[in-house]
Amino acid sequence: MSRPAVATLLVATAAAAILLSVAFGAVHLPARDILGAMSGHGDETTRTIIRNLRLPRALLASLVGGGLALAGAVFQALLRNPLAEPYILGVSGGAAVGAVLAIALGLTAFGSWALPGAAFAGAILAIVLVFRFTAAAAPGLDVRVLLLAGVVAAAFFNACIMLILSVSEASTVRSAVLWMMGSLAGAQWGSVAIAAAYTLPCGAVLLGLARALNLMAIGEETASYLGTDTQRIKRVAYGVASLVTAAGVAVSGVIGFVGLIVPHAVRLLAGSDHRFLLPASFAAGAAFLTLADLLARTVWAPAELPIGVITAFIGVPLFLVLLRGGLRP
């Protein structure tokens, strides 16, 4: 399939996913009422459901899904590892510690911003620790040391989570576990603005690194001969991709498989040129997570499933199919 055709398909799918997410939910609304609410007419209840609940949730799902897929594509390129994904450097563990600690200490009573704020702070702490340790242990941001630091950080943060949960009440444990399974139930226009403020500028920076990532895919030594400052590219790309991941985790919890399988699927459709792969991964990730969130809201309505459960049920068989087709970074 040609790249223009793939681009058109992905953008159309992402737009359709947003429309479907707005149109369907636990409460059935006629198409006429939905159109009226979108234009500012209709009854107040319908307007509230569409404009204050479903629309921000659909947009947040698009931003988080697109950001995770974009970050996954960047990590796979930098590490030249088909199993690389956005949480590989311990970002999710740091965010989970911040969120669980906020729940255990009752900080969520201070406002809806407390939980995502604590999660974001934990994610940033994880990024700083991993990068500082890597810089101290090996000059030049050695990939092997970076991966080891990420694994060790993730293990440490997991131990912190277990410690907090072991001395917490049952209600705290339930709330923490549900957060760690991922959910967009608390989506508001404020969380959409926060996600957009980090994801869109950082995404633009990563898109600007596409040519350098193409050169580095050949090899760092070759890229250096061709005039690429590989150390600067690695620092910027790792840091910015981690920041995108931190913003997504802060507003949605830990959602797996988006950053792992979406870049591979796009790569199979249109090749490994990062000038196309990165924006296409963003569009595909947006569509994937928006549709997954729609399933989470409707498949067991009126109850709602954690979105991480949906992405895992879809992602595992899809990953096995991609595995048979041959994964490549």
Image (cartoon, rainbow, N blue to C red):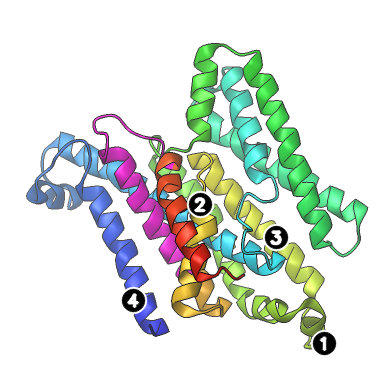
At 54% from the left and 17% from the top, the residue drawn is: 172
Q: Nearer the viewer, residue 34 or 84?
A: 84
Question: Which three-letter amino acid code belongs to the residue tagged 4?
Answer: Thr
Q: Main secondary structure of the magenta part?
A: helix
Residues at discs 4 and 1 in contact (Cβ within 8 Å): no
What residue sits right under mark 3 in the picture? Answer: 238
In the rendered image, the quadrant that contains the C terminus is: bottom right
Residue ranking furthest to the bottom? 226
Q: Nearer the viewer, mark 3 or mark 2?
A: 2
The mark that comes first in sequence, 1 or 3, is: 1
Q: Nearer the viewer, mark 2 or mark 4?
A: 2
Q: How far across and how far down the image is residue 151, in percent?
A: 74, 45
Residues at discs 1 and 3 in contact (Cβ within 8 Å): no
The mark that comes first in sequence, 2 or 4, is: 4
What residue sits right under mark 2 in the picture? Answer: 257
Residue 125 is marked as none
Assess disc 4: are there few (<14), some (14-19) or many (≥20) residues with their C-alpha within 10 Å of its C-alpha: few
What residue sits right under mark 1 in the picture? Answer: 225
Q: How far across and how far down the image is residue 192, in percent?
A: 43, 47
Q: Nearer the viewer, residue 197 or 179?
A: 179
Assess disc 2: are there few (<14), some (14-19) or many (≥20) residues with their C-alpha within 10 Å of its C-alpha: many
3D distance between C-alphas at marks 1 and 2: 35 Å
3D distance between C-alphas at marks 1 and 3: 22 Å
The stretch in magenta equals 280-307
What residue sits right under mark 4 in the picture? Answer: 8
The mark that comes first in sequence, 4 or 1, is: 4
Q: Is residue 128 visible?
A: no
Residues at discs 1 and 2 in contact (Cβ within 8 Å): no
Query: In screen coordinates, is 265 left or right of 147?
Result: left
Question: Which three-letter amino acid code belongs to the residue tagged 3?
Answer: Tyr
Question: Which three-letter amino acid code belongs to the residue tagged 2?
Answer: Phe
